[in-house]
């Protein structure tokens, strides 16, 4: 008898639980559903449809396409133009990341001193990071102009003639790296500054008492304690420089001139002169997995960082 | 909150050899005196050379490199063509003119583009922030099985750059008839992973007691979100909102791909068009006027609200 009562009670409890659960689900979907739907439709669906398109020989706008398996990938990894994209991406990424990190660290070291007016300086240094890449690139187009630009006047003052920034492919690549570093170094400076300020002052003071000079203090005390920040910036900067530079590249070298990094190539292949949609989709898939790999590496390091501190 | 805020003055006090207990008794005037102390410190006779050589000189060089291009842009936008093509340019325009801005309006429908940019930025950001708030709330406070799995799915979306989804989204939006429309520009970017992520972290740190009291009063999730969670999170929401505004205003790739006629372009795309038609050396003044129009609004917003914007953009670096 008592067992029958128990099961009856249990049943009511289960039913109440289910009712609560389904009420929770409908509320959850009401709150989060639209966002989840948008992410599925415009981020996840493209990811998978790209994988399908990447197996096609297909021109954008054409109604016919041929299945060619993995040929697009093979072309991207073996053809001269594909390998050129990898070379340009590697140089651009290395230059952009090292340039903005080294200059950012130098600025952060100066801003870390106790001097009046440094907050205003910090704001000014960070400001290019929030400005339109197109606008910034237009300004630098004027500065780099070999005959009328501000830079040619400055170089002329020292008796040097301006390099052919727009005609020579190597100079073009160097030029877009300079602009990217200019826009990005304030971000590195602010993150480095936060890292520097988290270093306990007494450690630096102890080293000073032990008569360590400023360089020795930096190399033996500051830099080791800054490693988590360096790792963080290294990874985020690699990811940013591979994905955020499109507006500068497109505005300064509209059809790609020694500046076809992987993101620029995705755009140029499908929306540029060639309209090779299938090939472009294959590059997009490769880019996604490259970024996925870098992020996975970062997560490992972040874990280590937690144990370290 | 109050703990972290008091940390800096306390450290300051300790560095100056004042015991922390004395700190509380400091009046406003005394604190001002202490700040003055750091000025005197930096400019005292033994520190003066050090302050100038290793402090102000490098900062000055850095500021020149950062500010000069922007100053050059503003100055050139007021210069007539003769002052642009001259071989002896001056930093300030000798004969300032507004012709360049007038010329931009003649070449492209500037006011329409400016309006488009404002419309896309305001509508896009408002919807994104609302979605981020409700999604983050659901992920933290509405208990359904598998919500951590859903959060993981949103995290992965965070690292997919727009270039990867450009081609399929172009086909989807074109299929829906959204090519060359403002809603076509806005729609694919509405799903927000960044804002959801940031606000979820913030909501998780809110004290549970705050909500328990409201639950005893019989408050449902709507009231808990809009009367408790959202109002106490205004700074975090403002951060998400401002970062979203900056990104929407500067967005270039997607509007470039999906628009065709000048009347539907946002400012960055319109300026790109302007640059392709103005190819003579003398027209740099017109191009700089265009650059001023796209850059100045963000520069002003940043100058006014830099604290929130810097915090939002450097998320993840500082715990």
Image: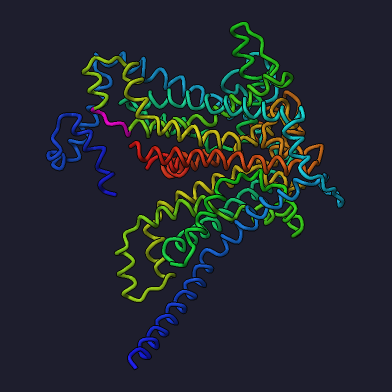
The quadrant in which residue B89 appears is top right
Q: In the rendered image, is residue B264 in sight? A: no
The quadrant in which residue B128 appears is bottom right
Estimate the x, y position of residue B269 in percent, counting from the top left.
69, 41
Residue at left offset 62%, top offset 5%: A159
Estimate the x, y position of residue B294 in percent, counting from the top left.
61, 39
- Give the total number of marks visible in the rendering: 0
User: Between residues A61 and A57, which one lies in front from this camera angle?
Assistant: A57
Residue at left offset 64%, top offset 40%: A287
Estimate the x, y position of residue B70 in percent, counting from the top left.
55, 29
Based on the picture, tell me whether residue B213 belongs to the magenta stretch: no
Looking at the image, the residue that sits furthest to the top is A159
User: Between residues A239 and B99, which one lies in front from this camera angle?
Assistant: A239
Looking at the image, the residue that sits furthest to the bottom is A1
User: Between residues A2 and A93, which one lies in front from this camera angle?
Assistant: A2
Q: Measured along the vertical axis of the image, is residue A277 above or below residue B277?
A: below
Estimate the x, y position of residue A79 in percent, counting from the top left.
77, 30
The answer to whether residue B154 is left or right of residue A115 is right
Q: Measured along the vertical axis of the image, is residue A265 above or below residue B184?
A: above
Q: In the rendered image, is residue A216 in sight? A: yes
Q: Measured along the vertical axis of the image, is residue B148 above or below residue B72?
A: below
Residue at left offset 19%, top offset 34%: B13
Q: Which residues are magenta?
A: A198-202
Q: Principal SS element in the magenta part?
A: loop
Based on the picture, tell me whether residue A199 belongs to the magenta stretch: yes
């Amino acid at each position: 008898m008592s067992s029958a009562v128990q099961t009856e009670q249990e049943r009511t409890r289960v039913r109440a639980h289910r009712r609560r659960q389904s009420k929770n689900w409908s509320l959850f979907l009401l709150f989060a559903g639209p966002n989840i739907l948008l992410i599925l439709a415009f981020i996840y669906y493209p990811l998978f449809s790209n994988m399908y398109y990447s197996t096609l020989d297909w021109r954008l706008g054409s109604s016919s396409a041929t299945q060619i398996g993995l040929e697009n990938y093979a072309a991207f990894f073996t053809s001269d133009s594909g390998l050129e994209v990898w070379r340009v991406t590697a140089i651009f990424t290395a230059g952009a990341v090292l340039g903005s990190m080294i200059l950012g660290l130098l600025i952060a070291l100066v801003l870390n001193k106790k001097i009046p007016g440094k907050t205003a300086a910090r704001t000014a240094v960070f400001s290019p990071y929030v400005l339109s890449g197109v606008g910034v690139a237009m300004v630098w187009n004027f500065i780099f102009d070999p005959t009328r630009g501000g830079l040619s006047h400055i170089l002329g003052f020292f008796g040097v003639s301006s390099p052919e920034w727009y005609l020579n492919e190597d100079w073009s690549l160097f030029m877009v790296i300079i602009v990217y570093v200019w826009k990005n170094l304030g971000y590195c400076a602010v993150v480095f500054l936060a890292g520097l300020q988290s270093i306990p002052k007494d450690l630096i003071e102890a080293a000073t008492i032990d008569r360590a000079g400023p360089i020795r203090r930096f190399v033996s005390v500051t830099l080791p304690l800054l490693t988590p920040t360096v790792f963080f910036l290294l990874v985020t900067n690699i990811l940013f420089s591979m994905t955020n530079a499109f507006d500068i590249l497109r505005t300064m070298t509209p059809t790609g001139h020694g500046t076809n990094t992987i993101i620029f190539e995705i755009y140029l292949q499908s929306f540029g002169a060639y309209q090779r949609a299938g090939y472009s989709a294959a590059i997009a898939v490769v880019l996604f997995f490259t970024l996925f790999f870098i992020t996975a590496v970062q997560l490992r390091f972040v874990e280590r960082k937690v144990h370290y501190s | 909150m109050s703990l972290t805020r008091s940390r800096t003055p306390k450290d300051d006090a300790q560095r100056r050899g004042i015991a922390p207990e004395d700190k509380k008794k400091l009046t406003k005037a005394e604190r001002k005196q202490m700040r003055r102390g750091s000025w005197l410190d930096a400019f005292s006779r033994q520190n003066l050379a050090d302050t100038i050589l290793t402090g102000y000189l490098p900062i000055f060089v850095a500021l020149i490199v950062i500010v000069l291009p922007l100053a050059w842009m503003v100055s050139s936008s007021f210069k007539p063509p003769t002052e642009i093509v001259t071989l002896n340019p001056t930093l300030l325009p000798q004969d300032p003119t507004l012709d360049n801005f007038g010329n931009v309006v003649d070449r492209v429908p500037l006011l329409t583009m400016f309006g488009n940019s404002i419309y896309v930025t305001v509508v896009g950001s408002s919807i994104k922030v609302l979605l981020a708030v409700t999604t983050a709330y659901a992920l933290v406070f509405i208990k359904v099985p598998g919500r951590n799995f859903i959060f993981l799915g949103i995290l992965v979306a965070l690292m997919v750059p727009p270039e990867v989804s450009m081609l399929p989204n172009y086909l989807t939006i074109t299929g829906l008839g959204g090519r060359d429309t403002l809603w076509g520009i806005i729609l694919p970017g509405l799903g927000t992973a960044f804002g959801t992520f940031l606000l979820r972290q913030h909501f998780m740190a809110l004290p549970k007691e705050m909500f328990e009291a409201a639950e005893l009063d019989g408050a449902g999730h709507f009231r808990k979100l809009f009367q408790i969670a959202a109002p106490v999170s205004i700074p975090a929401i403002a951060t998400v909102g401002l970062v979203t505004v900056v990104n929407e205003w500067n967005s270039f790739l997607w509007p470039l791909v999906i628009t065709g006629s000048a009347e539907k372009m946002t400012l960055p795309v319109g300026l790109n068009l302007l640059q392709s038609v103005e190819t003579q050396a003398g027209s740099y003044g017109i191009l700089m006027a265009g650059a001023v129009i796209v850059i100045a609004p963000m520069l002003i917003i940043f100058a006014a609200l830099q604290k929130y914007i810097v915090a939002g953009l450097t998320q993840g670096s500082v715990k």
